[in-house]
Image (cartoon, rainbow, N blue to C red):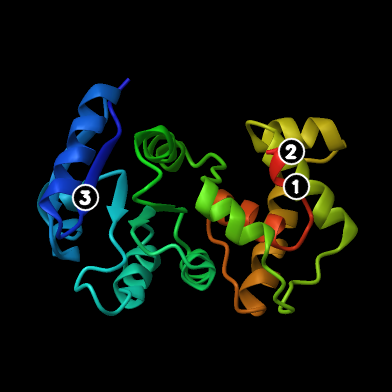
Amino acid sequence: MAPTRIVVIDDHPAIVAGVEAWCAKAGVEVVEVGATPAVAWTGPGGAADVIVFDLMLDGQVPAFGDLRRLVDAGRQVIVYTMRDDRDSVLTCLDIGAFAYLTKAEGPDHLIPAIHAAHHNLPCTPPTMARALSTDSRADRAQLTPREVDVLVSWFACESKEMVARKLGLSVRTVNSYIDRARIRYANAGRPAPTKAALVARAVQDGLVRLEDL
């Protein structure tokens, strides 16, 4: 099996060196590093499976715009930053980041998040979990009971085929319910283009508990 390939966008050499060392031990290939998002658009970084992204590249203003451009291009982005406030976490998740970790969380959480991002599996590191569990915003998507059933079953299953067998539906119908849920979240201003993003939305809205994931 080919190793997970990542690009690290961070302007702190010590952090980059640490991530490279952790990845080397875990069989993750760091194909490019750089202090700006440019390294994720061309060369080896442009083909990386996962982007590890420092939100505070200039030390002053969160790089939400750069994050949005990467997500809009279909990239799997893990925000890895010193910033630990709830609003930053929720904003990044709303933009479509796969996961949010602080640099205090280290390899025990970053490496599993990288693997989860590569395989599009649910992942809720501690900082992200705390932010989700205390999110009380009112802009919640109004899902039907059947849409909720399909989503919750999908989170617990390895494939949509398994969901279809469990609920007695066709795979096409399962896809339809998931697509409708995504549309509802998009219309509520909270896009969820990936399975991980849908998990985050479901946790935020109380549809599934963190301990059930």
Image position, residue 27 (x, y; %):
26, 24
Image position, residue 24 (x, y; %):
20, 27
Kind of residue sitting beneath label 3: Val
The C terminus sits in image quarter: top right
Instruction: Determine if residue 76 is in view.
Output: no
Q: Earlier in the sequence, mark 2 or mark 3?
A: 3
Would you identify the image quadrant in which residue 152 lies? top right
Left or right: 44, with 89 as reference point: left
Residue underneath mark 1: 209
Secondary structure beneath dot 3 equals strand
Secondary structure beneath dot 1 equals loop
Residue at 54% x, 67% y: name it: 86
Q: Determine the CA span between mark 1 and mark 3.
A: 31 Å
Left or right: 122, with 201 as reference point: left
The N terminus sits in image quarter: top left
Q: Determine the CA span between mark 2 and mark 1.
A: 5 Å
Q: Specify few, some or many for label 2: CA neighbours under 10 Å numbering under 14, 14-19, or 20 or more.
A: few
Q: Which mark is residue 212?
A: 2
Kind of residue sitting beneath label 1: Arg
Kind of residue sitting beneath label 2: Asp
Q: Determine the CA span between mark 2 and mark 3.
A: 31 Å
Left or right: 170, with 89 as reference point: right
Secondary structure beneath dot 2 equals helix
Residue at 13% x, 61% y: name it: 35
Q: Is residue 175 above or below residue 111?
A: below
Residue at 70% x, 55% y: name it: 203
Q: Which mark is residue 162?
A: none
